[in-house]
């Protein structure tokens, strides 16, 4: 039977990763299509990488490395549970990954992150790392907020919808895993990964205030239903003008997304979820921003996925006639 390891990526005292891993395992154990097991890095104390040869060589000299390699090799796929520490993954998780190579490659992996903002930045870095190792990183992921998914920021109480998101992630990890490793990615999975990278490109370009970087992500005839008037912004120049206005207002700006769900066809695709723009204004005022609903629609043009339509909205209080801007995903 296919074996999936649920890896706890933190060893910090008072960590919440063990709660999250138990939640993942309890849900996964109800399935009959794979066997699931928690892997706790506390049970695998690894010093800072001390192998004299690169992991690519596959010649491990130390006993702790060989024991770790034997553990990882037993699994056909993984769910990695990671917190976000200073906008990154824990050092102990990076260290554990760096010890090995052949034991990781061609295996499926999904990500469950947690933190003040859902741990999304840590998950992005972890995804990039695993893809460099030729792992099959699935598109769905679960992001748990300390504000909304943990009672008193301490006890895991997942918000409505997190279970279905976890089930979707597990569906993909199991489907991409076999008794010998991850299946070759399908065209749809390859396209899903490309579209997610496009969204990552938006986040990076906004953070670096890079209008030219944004220009490369949109089609020339893009139609945008943005949050500000008028009803629509037609064409690439109109869309970039909106971003230029944002960069004029903000001294520092950040854009984050949660719960992105893609649907991909042969040459048309869309991805929807939630986004929040925040940062520091020119006068030094910190702006936390508001969560909005976002949808990006893509067309494959000359082999490249470009945004041809996007839409941003907030729920409307019908009787009051005002947008509801204090909701969190």
Image (spheres, rainbow, N blue to C red):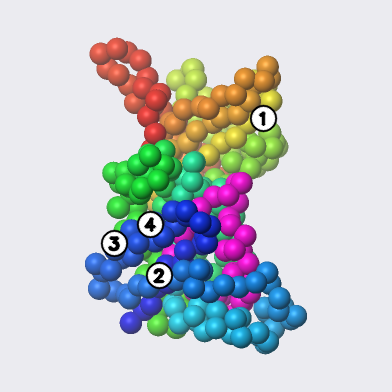
**SS label for mark 1:** strand
Bounds of the magenta span?
79-108
* Frontmost residue, 235 versus 249: 249
Please say if 272 is above or below 253: below
Residue at which label 1 appears: 252
Examine the rendered structure and indicate whether residue 106 appears above or below residue 167: below
Q: Earlier in the sequence, mark 3 or mark 4?
A: 4
**Decide: marks 4, 2 in contact (CB < 8 A)?**
no
Residue 218 on image: x %, y %: 58, 39
Q: Earlier in the sequence, mark 3 or mark 2?
A: 3
Q: Which mark is residue 27?
A: 3
Element type at mark 2: strand
Question: Residue 49 falls in which quadrant of the image?
Answer: bottom right
Q: Which image quadrant: the C terminus?
A: top left
Left or right: residue 314 compared with residue 206: left
First of labels 4, 1 by sequence position: 4
Q: Nearer the viewer, mark 4 or mark 1?
A: 4
C-alpha span from label 1 to label 2: 40 Å
Give the mark nearer the N terminus: 1 vs 2. 2
Q: Judge whether residue 190 can be spotted in this image.
A: no
Camera-side mark, 3 or 4: 4
Residue furthest front as drawn: 13
Q: At 52% from the left edge and 84% from the top edge, which residue is drawn?
A: 70
Looking at the image, the residue that sits furthest to the top is 320
Front disc: 1 or 2: 2
Q: Residues within 10 Å of mark 2 (few under 14, many from 20)?
A: some
Q: Residues within 10 Å of mark 3 (few under 14, many from 20)?
A: some
């Amino acid at each position: 039977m296919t074996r999936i390891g649920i890896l706890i990526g933190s060893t910090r005292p008072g960590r919440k990763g063990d709660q999250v891993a138990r939640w993942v395992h309890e849900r996964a154990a109800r399935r009959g299509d794979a066997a699931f097991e928690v892997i706790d890095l506390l049970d695998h104390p690894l010093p800072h990488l001390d192998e004299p040869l690169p992991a690519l060589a596959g010649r491990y000299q130390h006993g702790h490395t060989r024991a770790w390699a034997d553990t990882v090799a037993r699994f056909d796929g993984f769910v990695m549970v990671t917190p976000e520490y200073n906008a990154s993954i824990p050092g102990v998780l990076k260290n554990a990954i760096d010890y090995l190579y052949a034991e990781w490659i061609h295996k499926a992996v999904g990500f469950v992150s947690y933190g003040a903002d859902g741990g999304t930045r840590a998950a992005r870095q972890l995804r990039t790392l695993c893809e460099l190792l030729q792992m099959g990183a699935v598109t769905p992921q679960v992001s748990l907020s300390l504000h909304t998914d943990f009672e008193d920021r301490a006890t895991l109480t997942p918000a409505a919808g997190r279970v279905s998101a976890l089930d979707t992630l597990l569906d993909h990890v199991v489907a991409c895993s076999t008794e010998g490793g991850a299946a070759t990615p399908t065209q749809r999975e390859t396209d899903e990964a490309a579209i997610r990278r496009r969204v990552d490109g938006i986040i990076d370009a906004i953070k670096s205030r890079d209008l030219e970087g944004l220009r490369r992500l949109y089609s020339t005839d893009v139609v945008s239903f943005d949050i500000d008037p008028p009803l629509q912004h037609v064409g690439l120049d109109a869309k970039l003008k909106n971003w230029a206005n944002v960069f004029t207002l903000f001294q520092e700006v950040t854009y984050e997304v949660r719960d992105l769900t893609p649907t991909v066809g042969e040459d048309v695709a869309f991805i929807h979820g939630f986004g929040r723009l925040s940062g520091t204004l020119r006068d030094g005022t910190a702006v936390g921003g508001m969560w909005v609903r976002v949808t990006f629609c893509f067309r494959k043009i000359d082999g490249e996925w470009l945004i041809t339509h996007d839409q941003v909205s907030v729920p409307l209080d019908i009787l009051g006639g005002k947008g509801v801007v204090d909701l969190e995903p």
